[in-house]
């Protein structure tokens, strides 16, 4: 269990250090071009899910925060279970990355509204005397990585979006989102390795139960 714990700790540490730095050094909407126009640090916040997706209003925000906490508990239990069973090490690492990424964003949602001031009209301060910009479970997730590698317009013949602006990759995301995305990508690419053994074991067990070996004694 040591390796998954180390991975979780490192992802959380890097994720939170980046977010705290951005929150306390940038005002909302400020950006810094790292590599021309295709790699930009752009400070934004969102009320919803990964990559800036939203989930309706204050009730939606509260529901999403509560759901995330429950989901984290389930993922944590699953990680402990597969680690105990000594399943594929790479698969365990992937689940640890997903757990750490989800937990990283939950920390923002749960605590940031209480411990930081608002970023709309200036750089936020940590533990402001007047109180945070929101309440417990109503914090906003800090995003900063923006990669508009391709910019242009959809061709006129393109369905639905003809002549509209095209930006790839449009969403602004954070280190926690990256951790989750990398893990999901590895699982998709290695699904035969991760899941074929389980299916074979289930089939073998099923055959053994239905057709037990005869006893000639």
Image: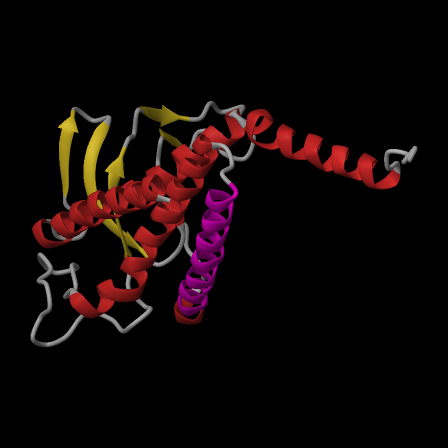
Side of 33 relative to 76 (left or right): left
Q: Can residue 174 be seen in this view?
A: no
Image side of residue 191 versus residue 59, left or right: right
> Residue 34: x, y in percent?
14, 29
State whether residue 43 is above or below residue 71.
Answer: above
* Residue 72 in sight: yes
Residue at 14% from the left image edge and 75% from the top image edge: 131
Quarter assignment of residue 36: top left
State the residue at coordinates (8%, 62%). 125
12 vs 23, nearest the viewer: 12
Q: Residue at x 64, y 34 (%)?
A: 198
**Which quadrant holds residue 209?**
top right
Q: Indicate the quadrant where residue 127 lies.
A: bottom left
- Residue 119 % position (x, y): 16, 59
Q: Where is residue 206 in the image (x, y as percent from the top left)?
A: 79, 39
Q: Which of 197 and 170 is in front in this view?
A: 197
Foreground residue among 149 and 94? 94
Magenta residues (range): 60-85
On whether residue 170 falls in the magenta region, the answer is: no
* Residue 63 colored in magenta in the image: yes
**Predominant secondary structure in magenta?**
helix
- Above-or-below relation of 128 to 161: below
Q: Where does the N terminus fall, quadrant-wise?
A: top left
Q: Check the image and name the residue furthest to the front.
A: 217
């Amino acid at each position: 269990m040591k390796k998954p714990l180390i991975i979780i700790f490192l992802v959380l540490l890097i994720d939170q250090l980046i977010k705290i730095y951005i929150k306390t050094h940038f005002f909302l909407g400020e950006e810094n071009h790292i590599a021309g126009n295709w790699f930009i640090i752009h400070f934004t916040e969102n009320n919803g899910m990964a990559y800036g997706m939203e989930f309706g209003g204050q009730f939606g925000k509260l529901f999403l925060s509560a759901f995330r906490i429950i989901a984290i508990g389930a993922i944590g239990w699953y990680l402990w279970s597969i680690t105990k069973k000594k399943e594929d090490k790479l698969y365990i690492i992937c689940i640890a990355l997903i757990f750490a990424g989800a937990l990283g964003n939950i920390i923002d949602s749960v605590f940031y509204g209480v411990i930081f001031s608002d970023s709309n009209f200036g750089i936020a301060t940590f533990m402001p005397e007047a109180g945070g910009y929101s309440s417990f479970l109503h914090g906003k997730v800090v995003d900063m990585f923006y990669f508009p590698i391709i910019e242009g317009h959809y061709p006129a013949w393109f369905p639905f979006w003809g002549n509209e602006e095209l930006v790839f990759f449009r969403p602004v995301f954070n280190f926690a989102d990256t951790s989750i995305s990398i893990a999901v990508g590895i699982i998709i690419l290695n699904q035969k390795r991760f899941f074929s053994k389980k299916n074979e074991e289930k089939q073998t067990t099923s055959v053994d139960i239905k057709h037990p070996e005869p006893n000639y004694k």
